[in-house]
Amino acid sequence: MREKFHKLPKADVHNHFHLGGTAQRLNARYPQAHIEIPAKFDGLDGMIDFIYGTLNQVMCTAEDVVFFMEMALESSIEDNVTLLEASVDVGLARFFDGSIDRVIEEVVQLKQRYKDRIDFRPDIGVNKDLPLEKVYSHGMHCIASGHFHGIDIYGKEAGKDLKPFQDLFHTAREHQLKTKVHIGEFSGHETIEGTILLLKPDEIQHGIRAVDSEKTMDLILEHDIRLNICPQSNLALGAVNNLKEHPIRTLFDKGINLTINTDDLLLFDATVTDQFIDLLEAGVFTFEELDSIRRNGLDS
Ligand SMILES: [Zn+2]
C-alpha cells in the first residue's frame, strides 16, 4: 500500500517552504551540527524555540536559506508530490540584506530550475509577529511582482487580531491570489468563525477545532472553504492526542473539503505518503477515501 500511495501524484498545499526538507538532507549538509529533531514539541512555543535555538544556528546565510528551500523541492519530488504550494516567509529578507527582491529572485530561479519536475506555486508567507510595516512593504512588493500564487498568514493563533491584515488580503484578492490563513489548530472554533467573516479566506490552514461547533462547520461549508490539514504536525505539537481522535474524520463526514499536508517536513518527519499510510493503518480512512482526499489536493 505504501508503494501504491508513494507512486501516485500528490499535492502538498500547506508547506512552509524553507522547513520542507528532510532531516537526512539537513544533516548530510551540516554534519558537524548533529541536529536532532525531537519527536514531540512543547506546543507552538516549543517548536519556535527549536527553530530559533537549533535550526537558525545552521541557517545563517542567504546561501543556507536557498539550500533549505531547495531541500523542500527535492524532498517533495522524492515523495511524488507533483503540486507544491509552499509559503515563502517574507521575513527571510533579513538574510538577503533586507532585500525582498533578492528573495523573490531566488524563488523564481528555483521555480525555473525545477519546472519540469514539480508544479511549484509559491505563496507569500506572512508571520503575524513581523512588524506590520514590513508585512506591508514586503507583502505588497511580492503581490506586485506577479510571481506568487497565494498568500498565507501564520504564527500564534489565540488572541491575535487579524484586522491589520485585511487590506493585504484585499489587495492579494484583487491580484487573483489564493488567500490562506492559519487558524483553529490551537485556537477555538469561534476564532475560525471570526477569521472567515473578517478575512474571507479561500482556504484555512489547520482549522481542526471547527469540529467543536456545528455552526462553525456549517459556516465553512457555506463559504466553500477548504481545510488544509497536517495530522502529524497536530500530533507532534500536542494539538491532538492520537490519530484515532483526530477531528479529520468528523470534518470529512460533515462534507468539508479537506487535504492532507506536511506543514513542516523537517520538524514533523512525515511525508504526505507517510500520513496517508498512518491514517489508513489507524483505521481512520479507507484507501478510497484517502484517494479522494489525494485527488482533492491536486484540484487546486
Ligand atoms: Zn502551517
Image (tube, helix red, strand yellow):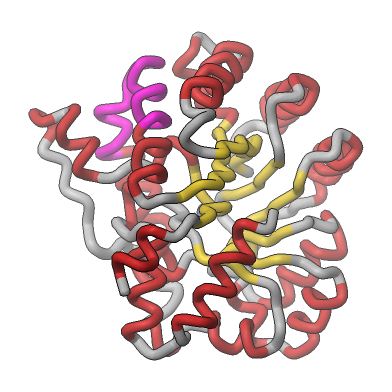
Q: Residue placed at 65% from the left, 47% from the top?
A: 153
Residue 132 spot, x, y in % from top left:
71, 33
Q: Is residue 51 magenta?
A: no
Residue 259 spot, x, y in % from top left:
58, 66
Residue 35 spot, x, y in % from top left:
16, 41
Left or right of 141, for residue 45: left
Residue 7 spot, x, y in % from top left:
38, 58
Left or right of 20, for residue 129: right
* Quadrant of residue 295 within the rendered picture: bottom right
Q: Could you say which is closer to the camera, residue 280 or residue 46?
A: 280
* Quadrant of residue 201 within the rendered picture: bottom right
Left or right of 123, for residue 22: left
Q: Is residue 58 magenta?
A: yes
Q: Residue placed at 75% from the left, 48% from the top?
A: 179
Of the 4 image quadrants, the one containing the C terminus is bottom right
Of the 4 image quadrants, the one containing the N terminus is bottom left
Q: Could you say which is closer to the camera, residue 45 or residue 153?
A: 153
Q: Could you say which is closer to the camera, residue 80 or residue 147?
A: 80
Instruction: Tell me if residue 102 can be seen.
Output: yes
Q: How many discs mark residues in the rendered view?
A: 0
- Magenta range is 53-70
Q: Residue placed at 46% from the left, 35% from the top?
A: 117
Q: Residue placed at 41% from the left, 45% from the top?
A: 76
